[in-house]
Structure formats: structure tokens, C-alpha cells
Image: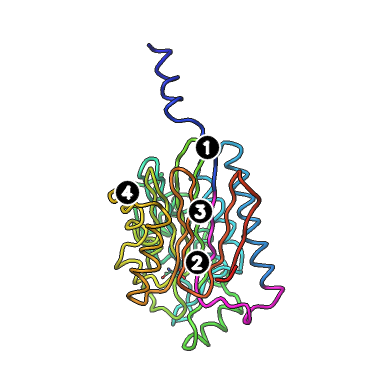
Amino acid sequence: MRLILPLLLLAAHPAAAQVLVVHGGAGTIRREDMTPALDSAYRDALRGALERGYGLLERGGTSLDAVEAVIVMLEDSPLFNAGRGAVFTSAGTVELDAAIMDGATGAAGAVAGVRHVKNPVALARMVMARSPHVMLAGEGAEAFAKEQGVRLVPQKYFFTQRRWDALQAAKQARQRGTVGAVALDRQGRLAAATSTGGTTNKRPGRIGDTPVIGAGTYADSGCAVSGTGHGEYFIRNVVAHDICARLRYKGETLARAAESVVMEKLVGQRGEGGVIAIDGAGNVATPFNTDGMYRGWVSPSGPVVVKIYRDE
Ligand code: ASP
């Protein structure tokens, strides 16, 4: 019996094919506003992150490690509104939110309003793994970071001319570019992670949907979602959890559930944004109701796919 049981367990959980999906934010992203150089810089950054995360999954790594690694790479890029390239608050400061969730265990970690943490997603993972809490905010989160040996960076690390100019122009257009990742590993475990600087010109202290488990980030044993868009709508509609709950309780397909929430519910309220979502069978959905969403995915069935605009 002792010998047979592990074999039965193995048979019940055959190695799944790994799948990884990323987003780099949804919003007013139009071809006519892009230079060819910027367009390819975004595509290269997304492709690089997908290749890195997928490599981990192919070597048998966990979906949790993959989503963290992908988000750290995108946080380090000045192109995205997360980590290094984060947008400014109305006070000219940078305040970062991030979350990570392990669908296999239901464990989750999040940080909100941190100002000196280079990789908020890594700190969110530490909150999950090394504290009894789910979310830490502001100074308390940074004190925890120091205790964990995380090197804090000065606010000037996050200064990018582009975001500064965007703050000055913020009254005209809201700049977005949150990053997110969802993954399915070979053991069939799902995970989600999201990281953001929030919305340009936000009030200091404002916290969006990204670190709110169930709103901007959620994973369970059958579904994982990372969102991007107007965070207040994602919080009110508990978007990420709603999508997963539709699969679980209504038996909807992933595509139908993600479509209903993003293209019907949110659109009905004029809540702009999109999600990346994956289910336990490796199905992927990436609906968005904005002009564009930086997005990409990779699975054993084809090469890395990267897209930006609505019409591609
Ligand atoms: N959802 C993020 C927030 O509201 C922003 C974004 O995705 O662009 O904080």
C-alpha cells in the first residue's frame, strides 16, 4: 500500500504542460502615439520576461517562482509602471503596490504604498512566506523589508523623465503600465502576481486594486488572474476573484468568464482595463476594453507571442 499510494497520486496529477502569460498594462496605447523604437523596446522586454519565466517552468520550476521572476524583470525595466518606471503621485513621489498568490495553497502576500523597495513583488512574496500576514503597507512594510535584509533604494532610483513628463501632462491622459503574470507549472499549480506604481497623479496614500487579493490579483486551484486598469473599478467589482468564481460556481469557461467581467460588467460601468487569465487546463484569456494592452504568452504549442494593440 505504501508503494502504491504515491503512484496513484502521480496518476491523479499527470504532469501538465506549462503555460505563462504576462501583461504590461492596459490603457491608451495607440500605434500613432508610438515610435518604432518604443514599440520594439516594449515587445523585447515582454519577450525577454516570457522567455525567462518559461525557462524556469520548463526546468520544472513552480508557477510561483515563474511569476515572481517575470515581474522582477519587468519592475527593473524603466518601460513599465512598476518598480523602476513607476508613475508619480500628485506630490511627485512614487508609491508602489504589488501582490502574489499561490493558487495551489491559497497563500498570498501583498505590499502597498512602499516608496523605497526596488522589487515590491519580491517583498510581497516575503510577506506571504515569512510573516503571518497577507498585506503590509507603507513604513511598516519597509521596516519588514529591512528586517528581511532587503536593500532599500532612494526615491531618485524611480525617477524617469518620461513619467515626470507624464505627471505634468496627467490632466490630459492617464498613463498606465502595470505588470502582471499568471502561470501554470508542470505539476498543474497556478499562480498570479501583479506590480504597479498605481495611477499617475494619484493622491499620496491611494491604494489600487493590484495588492488587493481578489481585485487585481487572484489564484486558486483552477484559475489565476492578474488585472490592469482603473483600479477603483477592479476593487468594487472584485474582478479577479469574480472571474475565478464564475468558473467554480457557474461552470463558465475561462474565456466566457473573463469576457463577461471585462467586456460586459466593467464596460457597463465605464471601468477601463483588462486582465490576463489562465485555467487549470492551460486555457488563456486576455480580454481588455482599452485601445491596447501590452501582453504576451508562451506554451508548448507554439512560439512566444507578444501583442500591444487591439487590432493584432
Ligand atoms: N490597476 C492599477 C491601479 O489602479 C493601475 C494600472 O493597472 O494601470 O493601481
User: Can you tell which mark lies on residue 178?
Assistant: 2
- Residue type, label 4: Gly
Closer to the chain start, of discs 1 and 3, is 3
- Mark 3 burial class by Cα count in 10 Å: few <14, some 14-19, many 20+: some
Residue 236 drawn at (x, y percent): 29, 68
Q: Quadrant of the N terminus?
A: top left
Residue 179 vs 279, above or below: the answer is: below
Q: Which residue is mark 3?
A: 150
**Residue 301 belongs to the span the image colors magenta:** no
Q: Amino acid at mark 1?
A: Arg
Specify which label sits upstream in the sequence, 4 or 2.
Answer: 2
- Mark 3 or 2: the one toward you: 2
Horizontal relation, residue 45 to residue 153: left or right = right
The residue pinned by badge 1 equals 186
Asked if marks 1 and 3 touch (Cβ < 8 Å), the reply is no
Q: Give the amino acid at mark 3.
A: Val
Mark 1 or mark 2: which comes first in sequence?
2
- Residue at 49% over, 65% down: 116
Which of discs 1 and 3 lies nearer the camera? The answer is 1
Choose the circle earlier in sequence order: 1 or 4.
Answer: 1
Separation of residues labelled 1 and 3 (CA atoms)? 30 Å
Sort mark 4 into few (<14), some (14-19) or many (20+) by Cα contacts within 10 Å. few
Q: Amino acid at mark 2?
A: Thr
Closer to the chain start, of discs 3 and 2, is 3
Magenta residue span: 20-38
Compared to residue 309, the image places residue 243 above or below, namely above
Which numbered tag is attached to residue 251?
4
Q: Nearer the viewer, mark 1 or mark 2?
A: 1
Residue at 58% over, 71% down: 311
**Cα distance between the residues tagged 1 and 2:** 27 Å
Mark 2 close to ligand 1, CB under 8 Å: yes
